[in-house]
């Protein structure tokens, strides 16, 4: 794609590609604001590429994905990787957009050739949250109470915690799910905390679910920026807004996910963090896999040196698979084939 360029040879406009939901636009706007702050500080003397970036404008382009169009089926039944991603990546490859912004937990570990995970913003709230009509916390929900979620990971962990609860599926954006709850779909709803907080719905949250009860999805709470491999301009500016500690954890959790070969059809959770500062800093990670009904759940943790984060996470995944995870995966795949 041929760009109009400023006197220093750089494009005049940078285009961010995103889904069109309210939450996706909020995420894209966070990236836009971060990049604008970088552009204002990029004079000819303080960037590797040279030139003045301050005159570059940033636009957001919305792109409809398959996941936005297929709201009548549970995500676990669709079983398609990159459901909220593919069309945005196609626009990125074609040059229609310059940076693709995603919720990183939606981005498959296998990225198309020519693209790369360029960077991430600082991680927002990683935990899942409970939204309850009567402000009951999870431990206070009673036999027969109904919980709404579209996630097999959440369903499995909830049933492992309390088998007497009833789970119903819910699809749609944050606003739609909250509306369905208030219309009587369920007694309570489980959502990613980061989404509710970004959308300004703090008052709706009844409880931040402790991670010893519910481990989040790998990379939950992380906003990702995907770029083209042959675009050094975008590579530099994305690197400039990337939060290094979050990027370490993001790549480690994706290494775990790659070994587990998990998508929406498998209840898999993973969360990592850096503990301490400087040379005393350590990397820790926890991962799990469960069967679909939360009857068998394997959860393990590991810790080690920060530079070894991806290796530690991959090894943890291998240990979980060797401890019964392979049998759980085989069982789930057998169920999927028979449906």
Image (cartoon, grey):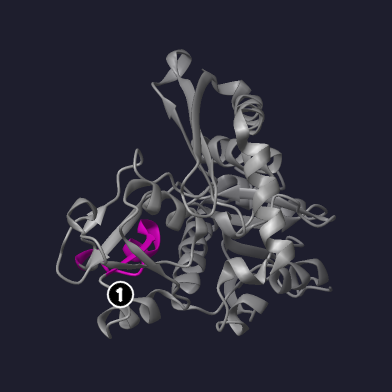
Whole-percent x, y for residue 246 in the image: 50, 40
Q: Is 14 or 293 nearer to us in this picture? A: 293
Q: Quadrant of residue 132?
A: bottom left
Farthest top residue in view: 279
Left or right: 156 as drawn, with respect to 162 = right
Query: Looking at the picture, does residue 233 appear above or below residue 290?
Result: below
Q: Callout 1: 10 Å neighbours few (<14), some, many (20+)?
A: many
Is residue 104 something that shows in the picture?
yes
Magenta stretch: residue 281 in it? Answer: no
* 70 left or right of 34 in image: right
Image point (35%, 62%), residue name:
190
Q: Quadrant of the N terminus?
A: bottom right
198 in magenta: yes
Q: What stretch is highlighted in magenta?
A: 188-203
How far from the left and from the top, in percent, is residue 224?
Answer: 58, 55
* Residue 53 visible within the image: no
Q: Which residue does the image show at 70% across and 38% down from the upper left?
A: 259
Q: In this view, does 244 lie above or below 112?
A: above
| Element at label 1 | loop
For residue 124, side relative to residue 53 (left or right): left
Residue 133 image offset from top left, x and y in percent: 19, 72
Q: Which residue is drawn at 66% across and 46% down?
A: 329
Give residue 103's position: percent from left, percent from top.
54, 60
In this view, the residue in front, 200 or 146, is 146
Q: In which quarter of the image is the C terminus?
A: bottom right
Residue, disc 1: 186
Q: Which residue appears at 45% of the width and 46% of the height?
A: 122
């Amino acid at each position: 794609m041929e760009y109009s360029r400023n006197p220093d040879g750089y494009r005049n406009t940078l285009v961010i590609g995103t889904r069109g939901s309210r939450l996706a636009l909020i995420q894209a706007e966070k990236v836009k604001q971060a990049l604008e702050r970088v552009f204002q500080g990029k004079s000819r003397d303080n960037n590797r590429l040279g030139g003045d970036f301050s005159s570059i404008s940033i636009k957001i382009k919305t792109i409809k994905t398959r996941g936005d169009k297929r709201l009548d089926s549970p995500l676990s039944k669709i079983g398609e990787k990159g459901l909220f991603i593919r069309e945005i990546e196609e626009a990125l490859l074609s040059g229609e957009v310059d940076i693709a912004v995603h919720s990183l937990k939606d981005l498959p570990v296998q990225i198309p050739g020519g693209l790369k995970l360029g960077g991430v913003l600082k991680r927002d709230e990683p935990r899942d949250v409970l939204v309850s009509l009567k402000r009951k916390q999870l431990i206070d929900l009673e036999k027969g109470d109904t919980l709404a979620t579209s996630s097999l990971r959440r369903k499995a962990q909830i049933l492992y915690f309390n088998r007497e609860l009833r789970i119903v599926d819910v699809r749609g954006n944050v606003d739609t799910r909250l509306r369905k709850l208030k219309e009587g779909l369920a007694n309570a709803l489980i959502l990613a905390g980061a989404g509710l907080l970004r959308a300004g719905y703090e008052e709706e949250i009844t409880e931040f679910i402790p991670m010893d009860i519910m481990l989040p999805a790998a990379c939950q709470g992380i906003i990702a920026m995907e770029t083209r491999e042959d675009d050094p301009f975008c590579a530099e500016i994305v690197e400039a807004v990337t939060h290094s500690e979050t990027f370490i954890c993001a790549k480690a959790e994706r290494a775990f996910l790659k070994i587990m070969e998990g998508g929406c059809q498998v209840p898999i959770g993973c969360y990592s963090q850096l503990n301490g500062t400087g040379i005393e800093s350590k990397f820790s990670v926890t991962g799990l896999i469960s069967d679909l009904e939360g009857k068998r759940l394997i959860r393990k943790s590991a810790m080690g040196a920060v530079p070894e984060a991806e290796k530690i996470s991959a090894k943890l995944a291998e240990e979980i698979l060797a401890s019964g995870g392979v049998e759980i995966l085989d069982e789930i795949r057998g169920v999927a084939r028979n449906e």
